[in-house]
């Protein structure tokens, strides 16, 4: 069961001139439960772009949940599928793409992200991740006795990579989607 995060609200955002962003992909990176899918959908709607979530696209193309892919093919098999999906989506122009938290671990994925669009890091604390995932049974990496420790390990490994890739960094801790989208739009305009 996945609970909606109370920190995101669905509010109308004023229109902005975004013609400079029409052909550029926007990639959202960050840890699990940082809000990449939620923010991505709203950002795409606001910018009148198509939205894609790499995990959802993998599920759509395979017909099975990510957890089953992990079970049958291991993390390595899933990461191969993830890289293939990113390559496919990177050929689009003018899309908003929410990536999986571990997407950045692969060197080629990092290169693809940097070369084909703007990279936005949605930063989220381990405490917030725990709150947002406490009832979520579909995240294979959290199926452990100590989810907090696992999230800390993932954060220590991945956060420096997220930071090094990011054109823009936005905190999603204890804030609503309107503020996050406004911050992203302001940052994109100033780029």
Image (cartoon, helix red, strand yellow):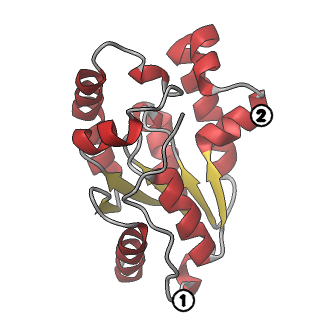
Q: Which residue is mark 1?
A: 15
Location of residue 62 (image quadrant): top right
Look at 48% across and 61% down and name the residue there: 39
Q: Secondary structure at mark 2?
A: helix
**Above or below for 80 versus 8:** above
Q: Few, some or many C-alpha atoms within 10 Å of disc 2 (few <14, some 14-19, many ≥20)?
A: few
Location of residue 190 in the rendering, given as x and y in whole percent from the top left corner: 34, 82
Location of residue 186 in the rendering, given as x and y in whole percent from the top left corner: 36, 80
Q: Secondary structure at mark 1?
A: loop
Location of residue 19 (image quadrant): bottom right
Q: Few, some or many C-alpha atoms within 10 Å of disc 1 (few <14, some 14-19, many ≥20)?
A: few
Which quarter of the rendering shows the N terminus?
top right
Q: CA distance from mark 2 to mark 1?
A: 34 Å
Tell me: 157 left or right of 190.
Answer: left
Judge by depth and name the residue closer to the eye, 173 or 167. Answer: 173
Q: Which residue is mark 2?
A: 61
Residue 160 in sight from this viewpoint: no
Look at 66% across and 49% down and name the residue there: 89
Judge by depth and name the residue closer to the eye, 147 or 55. Answer: 147
Tell me: 190 left or right of 25.
Answer: left
**Above or below for 164 versus 170:** above
Look at 54% across and 25% down and name the residue there: 79
Judge by depth and name the residue closer to the eye, 6 or 37. Answer: 6
Please give the count of numbered marks on the rendered protein: 2
First in sequence: mark 2 vs mark 1: 1
């Amino acid at each position: 069961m996945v609970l909606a995060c109370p920190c995101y609200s669905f509010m109308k955002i004023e229109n902005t001139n975004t013609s400079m962003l029409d052909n550029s992909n926007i990639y959202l990176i960050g840890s699990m439960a940082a809000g990449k899918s939620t923010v991505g959908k709203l950002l795409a709607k606001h910018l009148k772009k198509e939205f894609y979530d790499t995990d959802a696209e993998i599920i759509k193309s395979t017909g099975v949940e990510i957890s089953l892919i992990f079970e049958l093919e291991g993390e390595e098999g899933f990461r191969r599928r993830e890289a293939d999906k990113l390559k496919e989506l990177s050929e689009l122009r003018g899309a908003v793409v929410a990536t999986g938290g571990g997407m950045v671990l692969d060197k080629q994925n990092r290169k693809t992200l940097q070369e084909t669009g703007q990279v936005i890091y949605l930063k989220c604390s381990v405490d917030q991740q725990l709150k947002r995932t406490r009832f979520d049974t579909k995240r294979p990496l959290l199926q452990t006795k100590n989810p907090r420790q696992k999230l800390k390990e993932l954060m220590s490994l991945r956060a420096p990579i997220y930071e090094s890739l990011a054109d823009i960094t936005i905190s999603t801790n204890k804030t609503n989607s309107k503020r996050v989208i406004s911050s992203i739009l302001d940052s994109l305009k100033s780029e």
